Image: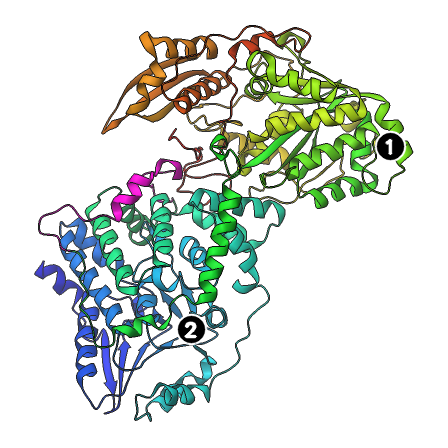
């Protein structure tokens, strides 16, 4: 240990102490390392600050850094090397001293002035943000990027970040976003702004101070203070979106909300936030969010004590080794490949895993951080939550609770997510959706906040798929996607599109007969039919329209064996009401925003790139093939275009995307991390479909094993019989309180088995129901699906995984997902 310390302490001038009798200066002097703090520097500063504090002649202490940075953080490499060498306790001891230094600055008995120029990050922020005066310039850059190396926002950041306006602290802590001096003053991270050319004048003026009177010190600084130029695209202009996204309860929900915002407005900072969060350590993100949320109602000493607990668990590798992997990859090896996080996906990081970081370290000689009372401890209360902040926090939490807990939210396990609907429209009606130069479809997208995409079909097919998607908003009667579906139907059926239309013509149109078809997954059809056809029968009785779910042998060529078509026909107004009821029933099938482009990919896969436009007799030489889609984060869905010919670059892009999704872990509804290939269906069946076999596992609490298996195996037999999937149950290695359920079969078989397992779990110890009888053929020709009887409300579909900066998904090029269970 002595050898290690010596190697880091070779330069005794890493921190300088200057000044006169009244004003003392603590100068970080490690410019070649951006003044990163090491054990030696922390020890020396603590010793000097305590001496200055008891010296009656010293009135003010000034903190500054030499070079182009104030302080870029702690010496992470030093702690890494010591811990890897087996000295984790030394690393913990060094970290404890760092936290104590921050505590000393925050509770100092005399004014501390931090001259913050250049970079200030991590431990540099911990040192300076607790000072009484924080002076920044236009060149100051603040960030807390710890999650990018597998660490967490520490050094008391959970205290000062949680006291920023709204949920700005969560944004800065989870994304590592950089903000500059003017924004630091605007949001309260800094107290004064001066121009960098005047910073030396401020320092000289402080040299003349002979009193600890803070009003006099403030008066000196104000002489050189300059009004900060807060840019229109600065962090304050983003606060509305930041509050909307980062007020969510979990990291998964925050990410989903950001992706939804990116779909509506592809602003650079939103895309960068998504990118940084997807590249960060999943467990670090969850630890940081929990820490910031707890810090909002705690004192500084409580926040620092919690930081020490978490750091000790990180150094001991209690749950994860992400800190060591991130440091190795990002700071030592500096590879182009991202760190290999473990756990690699957010949904694998359980609350229990995160909670262990906040618990006492299970070692006999370990002691928690005990910060002694200080004569000026009350100074740490200089930035408590104001009454306004408290009201704002409660208001946001109330809104968040209402938003995140829709009625029956336990039946929305995919929440939050997007609704996706696929209407089948005759090609002759496409023009009525698009309008002249696309103005109609654009208007519908703008007014509903949904995305509308008309997919190209193969030669000889007179139908087109209208792909409609949008963020679910359960507090509204119609979600954006549902609203868009109803508007599209009005366009193709001749119903009045809205107010101001001629009512008589609308009434006449309402009595005309029409039909509409939806393409749905087989699992959705099961849900729509209901037990013994109860749901579909109710829709027919209440609306007067006929609702028919086509059996597999009735399907047209562009539907796959895993899909069904729901056909509604009758008088236009009755069909309108039935369509609204049908999509309302399917509303709960939520899909992750990043997966939506795959629906389009599914139907464009078999279209020949070389086929000329004039070889398509079913498409008029006009703008019938059209789409309007606000740019989304994945960048896969193209922008609004009226071109008939497809750009060859689109095919190249799709080929690259197909390569990505061919990796394990993707499905449209539900989660299929075991998929080893992606079956392109296209809008035709020129060749036999490729049946992809899926292997998927579910980690389920041991207490539910009896519910899944049933008396004498009755439940699991029912699941196997109904889904036609292969199921096996075994013990989970290293997890004595869980079992592993392995499911094999096609994507649809796995999804149905997954659904039934979750239904048995939700019913908990209820006996397995017998197979439902066939429904009356007058209600549906889809009798086979009616036999399976268990309606599904548990289909999530999230692209998951971490460790990649790619916007298309998390982790290795594969995918994972978020869910109540870990797949």
Q: Which residue is mark 2?
A: 190
Which residue is at 39% across, 30% downward? 821
Position of 40 relative to 766 (above/below): below
Work out which quarter of the rendered image holds the C terminus and state it: top left
- Secondary structure mostly seen in the magenta stretch: loop
Q: Position of residue 686 (x, y in %)?
A: 65, 13
**Magenta stretch, residue numbers:** 338-367
Q: Is residue 476 above or below residue 138?
A: above
| Residue 645 visible within the image | no
Q: Which mark is residue 506?
A: 1
Image: 313 above or below 166: above
Q: Nearer the viewer, residue 656 or 148?
A: 148
Q: Secondary structure at mark 1?
A: helix
**Front residue (pair 208, 619):** 208
Instruction: Pick whichever of labels 1 and 2 is earlier in the sequence.
Output: 2
Which element carries disc 2, helix, strand or loop? loop
Q: CA distance from mark 1 to mark 2?
A: 61 Å
* 13 with respect to 805 (left or right): left
| Residue 308 seen in the current view | yes
Residue 627 counted in the magenta span: no
Q: Quadrant of residue 435?
A: top right
């Amino acid at each position: 240990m002595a050898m290690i310390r010596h190697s880091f302490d070779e330069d005794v001038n890493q921190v300088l102490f200057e000044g006169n009798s009244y004003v003392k200066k603590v100068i970080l002097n490690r410019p070649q390392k951006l003044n990163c703090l090491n054990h030696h520097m922390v020890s020396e500063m603590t010793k000097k600050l305590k001496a200055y504090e008891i010296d009656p002649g010293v009135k003010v202490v000034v903190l500054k850094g030499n070079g182009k940075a104030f302080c870029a953080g702690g010496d992470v490499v030093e702690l890494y090397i010591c811990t890897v060498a087996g000295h984790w306790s030394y690393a913990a001891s060094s970290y404890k001293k760092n936290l104590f230094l921050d505590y000393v600055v925050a509770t100092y008995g005399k004014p501390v002035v931090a001259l913050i120029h250049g970079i200030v990050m991590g431990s540099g922020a911990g040192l300076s943000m607790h000072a009484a005066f924080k002076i920044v310039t236009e060149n100051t850059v603040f960030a807390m990027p710890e999650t990018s190396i597998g660490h967490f926002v520490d050094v008391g950041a959970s205290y000062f970040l949680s006291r920023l306006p709204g949920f700005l602290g969560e944004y800065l802590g989870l994304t590592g976003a950089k903000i500059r001096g003017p924004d630091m003053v605007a949001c309260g991270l800094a107290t004064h702004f001066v121009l960098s050319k005047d910073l030396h004048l401020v320092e000289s003026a402080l040299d003349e101070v002979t009193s600890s009177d803070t009003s006099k010190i403030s008066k000196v600084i104000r002489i050189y203070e300059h009004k900060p130029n807060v840019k229109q695209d600065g962090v304050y202009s983003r606060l509305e979106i930041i509050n909307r996204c980062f007020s969510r309860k979990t990291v998964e929900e925050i990410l989903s909300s950001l992706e939804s915002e990116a779909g509506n407005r592809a602003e650079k900072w939103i895309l960068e936030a998504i990118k940084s969060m997807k590249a960060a350590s999943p467990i670090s993100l969850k630890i940081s969010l929990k820490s910031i949320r707890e810090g909002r109602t705690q004192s500084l000493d409580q926040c620092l004590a919690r930081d020490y607990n978490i750091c000790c668990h990180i150094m001991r590798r209690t749950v994860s080794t992400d800190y060591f992997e991130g440091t190795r990859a990002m700071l030592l090896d500096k590879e182009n490949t991202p760190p290999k996080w473990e756990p690699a996906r957010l949904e694998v990081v359980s609350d229990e895993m995160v909670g262990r970081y906040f618990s006492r370290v299970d070692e006999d000689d370990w002691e928690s951080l005990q910060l002694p009372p200080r004569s000026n401890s009350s100074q740490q209360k200089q930035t408590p939550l104001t009454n306004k902040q408290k009201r704002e926090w409660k208001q946001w939490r109330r809104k968040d609770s209402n938003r995140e807990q829709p009625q029956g939210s336990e039946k929305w396990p995919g929440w939050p997510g997007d609704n996706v609907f696929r209407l089948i429209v005759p090609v002759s009606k496409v023009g009525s959706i698009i309008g002249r130069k696309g103005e109609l479809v654009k208007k519908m997208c703008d007014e509903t906040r949904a995305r509308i995409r008309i997919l190209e079909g193969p030669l000889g097919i007179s139908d087109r798929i209208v792909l409609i998607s949008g963020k679910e908003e359960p507090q509204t009667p119609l979600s954006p996607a549902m609203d868009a579906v109803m508007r599209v139907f009005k366009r193709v059926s001749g119903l009045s599109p809205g107010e101001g239309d001629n009512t008589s013509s609308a009434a006449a149109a309402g009595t005309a007969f029409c039909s509409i078809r939806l393409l749905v997954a087989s699992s959705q059809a099961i849900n729509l039919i209901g037990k013994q056809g109860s749901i579909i029968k109710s829709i027919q009785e209440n609306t007067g329209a006929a609702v028919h779910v086509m059996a597999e042998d009735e399907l047209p060529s562009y539907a796959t064996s895993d899909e069904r078509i729901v056909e509604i026909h009758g008088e236009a107004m009755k069909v309108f009401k039935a369509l609204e009821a049908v999509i309302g029933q399917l509303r709960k099938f939520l899909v992750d925003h990043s997966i939506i482009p795959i629906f389009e990919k599914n139907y464009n896969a078999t279209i020949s790139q070389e086929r000329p436009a004039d070889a398509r007799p079913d498409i008029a030489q006009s703008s019938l093939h059209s789409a309007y889609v606000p740019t989304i984060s994945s960048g896969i869905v193209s922008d609004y275009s009226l071109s008939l010919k497809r750009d060859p670059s689109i095919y190249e892009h799709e080929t690259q995307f197909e390569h990505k999704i061919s990796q394990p872990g993707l499905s449209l509804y539900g989660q299929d991390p075991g998929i080893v290939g992606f079956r392109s269906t296209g809008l035709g069946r020129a060749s036999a479909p490729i049946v992809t076999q899926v292997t998927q596992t579910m980690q389920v609490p041991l207490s539910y094993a009896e519910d899944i298996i049933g008396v004498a195996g009755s439940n699991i037999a029912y699941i196997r019989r109904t889904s036609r999937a292969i199921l096996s149950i075994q013990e989970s290695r290293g997890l004595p309180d869980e079992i592993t359920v392995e499911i094999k079969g096609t994507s649809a078989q796995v999804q149905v088995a997954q659904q039934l397992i979750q239904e048995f779990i939700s019913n908990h110890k209820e006996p397995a129901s017998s197979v439902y009888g066939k429904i009356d053929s007058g209600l549906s020709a889809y009798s086979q699906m009616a036999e399976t009887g268990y309606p599904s409300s548990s289909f999530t579909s999230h692209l998951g995984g971490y460790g990649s900066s790619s916007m298309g998904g998390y982790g290795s090029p594969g995918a994972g997902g978020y869910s109540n269970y870990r797949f």
